[in-house]
Amino acid sequence: MRQSGAEAIAGMEARGFIFGAAVAAKLALPFLPVRKSGKLPCETISVDYALEYGSDRLELDPASVRQGQRVAMVDDLLATGGTACATAKLLRQAGAVVDHAFFVIDLPDLGGAAKLAKVGVAVAALMDFEGD
């Protein structure tokens, strides 16, 4: 994680808060919560993204990101990559440099890591579980 040059850690709602906040605390870095719509008590920027069963929106306080700040994303699970790609887009919209994402589990057969690679985000995971 340190090799990524991260200056802040972003965690996606909800389990990303647990893992991301712990990583941020361990590295003494700021934690940036990426929330579902309507949860932050401040002005936000947002990005809509497609899910397998519909769509959703993520929001971020743009004042929490410095222009050019290197931000690493942390979450529990990488599946199709939709939420992670939307998070990278949102952070970049706020001015962050996002080129690393860290997960506890990757499900490689669902293509999330490949989708993130296409948008310039390298993926690392503690473990992966391939399909049958």
Image (cartoon, helix red, strand yellow):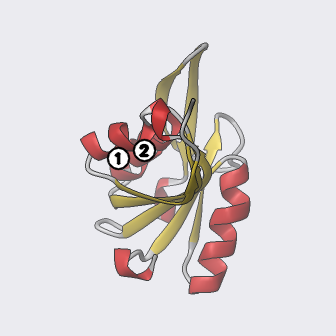
> Is 16 displayed left or right of 83 in the figure?
right
The residue carrying pointer 2 sits among few (fewer than 14), some (14 to 19) or many (20 or more) residues within 10 Å by Cα, namely many
Of 80 and 7, which appears nearest the observer? 80
Instruction: Tell me if I can see residue 34 in this picture.
Output: yes
Q: Residue at x 68, y 64 (%)?
A: 19
Q: Are marks 2 and 1 in contact (CB under 8 Å)?
A: yes
The amino acid type, in three-letter code, at marker 1 is Gln
Quadrant of the rendered structure where residue 90 is? top left
> Is 22 displayed left or right of 44 in the figure?
right
SS at circle 2: helix
Q: Residue at x 26, y 40 (%)?
A: 118
Q: Quadrant of the C terminus?
A: top right
SS at circle 1: helix
Q: How much space separates mark 2 and mark 1, taking CA atoms?
A: 5 Å
Percent coordinates x, y for residue 56 in the rendering: 58, 25
The residue carrying pointer 1 sits among few (fewer than 14), some (14 to 19) or many (20 or more) residues within 10 Å by Cα, namely some
Q: Residue at x 44, y 64 (%)?
A: 72
Q: Residue at x 48, y 26 (%)?
A: 49
Looking at the rendered structure, the number of numbered marks drawn on it comes to 2
The amino acid type, in three-letter code, at marker 2 is Leu
Of 107 and 39, which appears nearest the observer? 107
Quadrant of the rendered structure where residue 30 is? bottom right
Percent coordinates x, y for residue 44 in the rendering: 54, 45
Name the disc covering residue 90, or none.
2
Q: Which residue is mark 1?
A: 93
Q: Is residue 44 above or below residue 127?
A: above
Name the disc covering residue 132, or none.
none
Percent coordinates x, y for residue 83 in the rendering: 52, 37
Percent coordinates x, y for residue 41 in the rendering: 70, 49
Extreme top residue here? 53
